[in-house]
């Protein structure tokens, strides 16, 4: 039997995601993919496999999964309560789920999108070069109870590893580049935009996040004359009532609302992971600074494997303790060190 997880219970926003489908913008299909692609890299580092492999994205809450055979997993992204046959599991870590065991993942404690990775990656069929569900385009569907998630080939065996996630939870500062319509906004509006504390609205999804604030909106004169043109994830559109919307992974590909700016790709996970009510503040930077920031972020992401360390576990929390080799590393105490 091929290794698989059987879903017994699924949260309402559970989908298969990878890095999406680049190259189809001209045909009206946005890239899609994981709302927090950094979490894919963290899971890949923990399991020593490619970050291009698909994982299970869980929006706000997880579900219950039955392992049909032994399978390696990793948990990243928004921290959620996780147990294996009732025993608590460490988040941002890799674990072995033995055949017949039940993995349970509850509600998010911090952030919005959690990720369940499996050794070998999720092996659902590819469509247009990707396994990612793109619900607004009709590609794929939410996962549901009864679905069997098959795993790809997994030559590795390492588990019991953890890492400290790169910071992006709880809101904070978001860096922005000027957009094609930034010059339409008066300098006073741009300064007020940067000085405003925005609160992520509860009406947010994989298409876009509404940003609420006190005081007047950010509507610009002549906004209705803007022609519809290409838009991408990270663009900040100002709607007719002056409210900013940050476009996310499954955004449309064209739009006519003026864009006050565009969130840097490395900061977009911070927006995606912001809980409703979390405070976000936007700051414009230059193209030169943006290039330095993105280069540094890519380097940090590439170095994640070097940050992985063995977990320090309490023996009382290891259900199969007797199966471990506990004496091969012992010494007499008088050896030369």
Image (tube, rainbow, N blue to C red):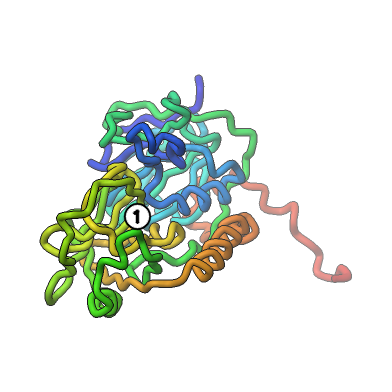
Residue 311 visible to the viewer: no
Residue 234 found in image quarter: bottom left
**Foreground: 251 or 158?**
251
Q: Which residue occupies 38% across, 35% down?
A: 26
On screen, 179 above or below 115? below
Classify residue 56 as left or right of residue 227. Answer: right
On screen, 79 above or below 15? below
Residue 300 found in image quarter: bottom right
**Foreground: 299 or 67?**
299
Which percent across, then down, holds residue 203? 17, 54
On screen, 127 above or below 319? above
Q: Which residue occupies 52% across, 42% down?
A: 96
**Foreground: 82 or 183?**
183
Q: Quadrant of the C terminus?
A: bottom right
Classify residue 237 as left or right of residue 35. Answer: left
Residue 100 found in image quarter: top left
Residue 271 visible to the viewer: yes
Which percent across, then down, holds residue 274? 30, 62
Classify residue 323 as left or right of residue 128. Answer: right
- Residue at numbered disc 1: 80
**Foreground: 274 or 64?**
274
Classify residue 219 as left or right of residue 303. Answer: left
Which percent across, then down, holds residue 248? 32, 51
Which percent across, then down, holds residue 45? 58, 50
Kind of element beneath mark 1: strand
Q: Residues within 10 Å of mark 1 (few under 14, many from 20)?
A: many
Q: Which residue occupies 50% across, 19% down?
A: 1
């Amino acid at each position: 039997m091929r290794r698989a997880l059987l879903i017994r219970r699924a949260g309402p926003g559970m989908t298969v995601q990878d890095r999406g489908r680049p190259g189809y913008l001209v045909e009206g299909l946005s890239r899609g993919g994981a709302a927090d692609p950094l979490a894919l890299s963290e899971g890949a580092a923990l399991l020593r496999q490619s970050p291009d492999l698909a994982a299970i994205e869980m929006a706000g809450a997880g579900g219950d999964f039955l392992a049909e055979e032994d399978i390696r997993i990793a948990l990243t992204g928004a921290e959620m309560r996780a147990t294996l046959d009732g025993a608590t599991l460490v988040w941002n870590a890799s674990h072995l789920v033995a055949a017949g065991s039940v993995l349970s993942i509850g509600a998010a404690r911090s952030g919005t999108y959690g990720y369940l990775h499996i050794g070998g990656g999720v092996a659902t069929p590819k469509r247009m070069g990707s396994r990612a569900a793109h619900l607004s385009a009709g590609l794929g569907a939410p996962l549901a109870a009864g679905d069997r998630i098959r795993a790809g080939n997994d030559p590795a065996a390492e588990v019991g590893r953890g890492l400290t996630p790169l910071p992006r939870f709880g809101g904070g500062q978001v860096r922005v580049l000027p957009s094609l319509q930034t010059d339409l906004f008066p300098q006073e509006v741009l300064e007020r935009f940067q000085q405003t504390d925005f609160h992520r609205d509860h009406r947010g999804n994989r298409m876009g996040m509404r940003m609420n604030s006190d005081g007047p909106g950010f509507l610009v004169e002549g906004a209705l004359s803007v022609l519809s043109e290409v838009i991408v994830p990270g663009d900040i559109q100002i709607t007719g009532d002056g409210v900013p919307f940050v476009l996310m992974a499954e955004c449309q590909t064209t739009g006519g609302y003026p864009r006050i700016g565009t969130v840097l790709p490395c900061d977009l996970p911070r927006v995606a992971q912001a809980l409703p009510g979390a405070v976000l503040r936007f700051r414009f930077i230059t193209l030169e600074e943006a290039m330095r920031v993105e280069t540094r972020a890519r380097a940090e992401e590439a170095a994640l494997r070097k940050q992985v360390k063995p977990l320090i576990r309490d023996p009382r929390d290891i259900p199969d303790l007797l199966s471990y080799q506990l004496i091969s590393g012992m010494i007499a105490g008088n050896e030369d060190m």
